[in-house]
Amino acid sequence: MIVGYRFSKKVIPYLFVAPNTLIFGVFVILPMFYGLLYSFYEGTFIEGLERFTGLENYQRLLRDQAFISSLVHTFAYVVAVVSLVVMFSLMLALALRASSMGSALARIGFYLPVILSPVVVGVAWRWMFSSDLGVINGVLVSMGHSPIPWLTDINWARAVVVLASVWAMTGFYMVIFIGGLNTIPSELYQAAEVDGANSTQQFWKITLPLLAPTTLLVTILATINSFKAFEIILVLTNGGPGDATRLLVQNIYQTAFDASNPTYASAQSVVLFSVLMLLTFWQLRITRED
Amino acid sequence: MKKIVFWLFVVLVSSIVLARGEIQVVWFTEAPTEQAIFERYVKMYEEANPGTRVEVTYVPFQQLTQKLQLMVAGNTPPDVARVVTANIAEFDRVALDLSTFVDSTSFLNQFLPSQVPFVRRGSRIIGAPLDVTANGIFYNKDCFAEAGIRVPTNSLNVWTWEQWREALNRVRNNSKCRFALSYDFTTHRFSTLLYAAGGRFIDDSGKQFVVDSQNSLRALTFFSELFRDGFIPRGQWLSNDDPSTLFRSGLSAMYMSGNWNLAQFAQISGFRWGVMPLPRDRIRSTVPGGKFVMGFRESKNPAGAARFIQWITSKEINLPFSRDNMVLSARRDAKGMKYGQFDDAIAVFQSDLSVTPAYVGRDWSNPAMARLNTFIRGEIVKVLLGQQTPKQALEAIQAEGNRLLR
């Protein structure tokens, strides 16, 4: 009887996690393993794996201009998006932290883009910023101004892509910041006021330092999400003009499906995976320390 | 226990029987009317073949290649797929060889000679032509009338490129059309100019890219000038704007695309439109292509696939099917077929096809072109952005093409 109890105590927890582990293993670990394996081969979707090439795909990455430029674009995009997202979501959280009806409505308004499909976001921004048919250029022209090449000029297109992404993401991080702000004891502000600190001083001396863990979390989450950006850009510019807004995920997609080279695309995915893995470890370490 | 075994046996047998009677089809659609038309024909097939069920998955054209690639890679190819020229070359090695089901000579003799090279690989037949496509220019009759420009109507008064450029300039400045020319963002459509200039991608042996030539250079330079001079809206090649929308909304005076748009353009009611013969440079040429049906070697029901392919390409079915879809049938006996209000437009496409050199079709039936499409488009875009010269673009395309052929 005791033996049976001990056995159940040991085994039952594993049975509970087994379905999840199985699903995770089949749909995450196994494809990951295959991705890694494919990256050491040459092959196509049609012919399958044709030849073991070792590190050849990785060596090719080092001299592949399309891959290198997409990697550079990705890092530039991540830096721009993350810094703007952190700044705007913090500003919104500070402005809308009060629990009034107006704040609640505004919070819903700013959160709405988060629940929109990225494709819808892309289409909406395209509709506004299209160089030839966009609403904004229509208004500019009707007011006697020259149209702006929003999506056909390299620099403008990059700016529009970053802004669209920031618009789509900010609401989510605003909610996290509001949660963080609510954990700061109000007594600290009251004490600061008694000591004669103005609101700017309160922000720099109380809010920002105590919000540091939340800011870090937001930064890491936004960084990971930005590295995976794909749909909005695909719909908005399709990576153009030229390859000016083509990021790593789109380059992987095009390598696999347009150029019919899934093994080389796998090597690129492994690089992206490694970057995201490092970021995730960093996030876990910081969360644990916190 | 015996009961369980019995029922398992029944399930097994019936699933085998059902699998044999089911034909899985992947059918891509471009015009909104296509799905309803095909469904009608599927019903006809099922009625004519009791016990057979045709299970159709409709995919937008843009997702066709990816869908098939993944199905083939997952070892679950469909029995039948409707594909385009580039696909039939790409899926060559996994294609169902129809020659094991039909008499090759009489089967292929049904089709226009221009379409046969796409599906014949030595003694194998890797598909069957459904219809013939040709690139061409649609134009807004109202805008041209407003600008006082007479558009060529037949092969005798075809514009030269310079006359075309002059017409683009006049129609933009003297009509309500805000844009002169919409141009599909594809290598295939660009190649219309390449061939008219006397250029080509691959030599007769099929083993060497020869695109880096003076003729090709002339074509790419001319194309980049159309952008530089503002005739083609830059957004169409630089930021994914849809050229078809611009034409259908009456904002663009011309549209370089192809005959597959006819069904869709039949819905246009805001202005009158027509098709003009393609302007000539050194030669007259269009780019022939087509839609095909093909089976897959590893599919569940190859025999059913072969039967369905023979049925849909037979005279009794293919001719009305082509007329319903307003496409050019790939059958020899379709000559003289009437399309009602589209007879004039069809005649222009047929005229362009009739003067197109054979090597144009050979270029596009080479599997290397399917893999090089995106690369070529990227190199052209670099020229439009001023990041490289047309000469550098052609050199890059030639080098990459030869690397793939090796």
Image (cartoon, coloured by chain):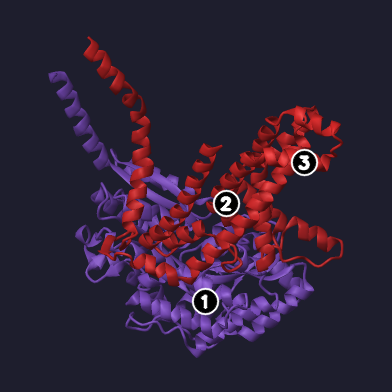
Residue A226, disc? 2
Name the amino acid, label 3.
Phe
Q: Is residue B308 left or right of residue A278?
A: left
The residue to which callout 1 is attached is B192
Q: Evaluate whether label 2 is on the same chain as label 3.
A: yes
Are the residues tagged 3 and 1 within 8 Å (C-beta)?
Answer: no
**B60 and A244: which one is in front?**
A244
B239 w.r.t. B169: above or below: above
Name the amino acid, label 1.
Thr
Q: Where's the N terminus of chain B, which quadrant? A: top left
Chain (purple): B
Q: Secondary structure at mark 1?
A: helix
The residue to which callout 3 is attached is A203
Front disc: 1 or 2: 2
Q: Chain of mark 3?
A: A
**A136 and A215: which one is in front?**
A215
Outermost residue toward the top in this view:
A1
Q: Is residue A262 visible?
A: yes
Counting from the top left corner in percent of width and height, residue B322 is at: 45, 58
Counting from the top left corner in percent of width and height, residue A30 is at: 33, 45
Name the amino acid, label 2.
Ser
**Residue positioned 46% across, 59% down in the render:** A252
Counting from the top left corner in percent of width and height, residue B274 is at: 62, 68
Q: Chain of mark 1?
A: B
Residue B285, disc? none
Q: CA distance from mark 1 to mark 2?
A: 40 Å
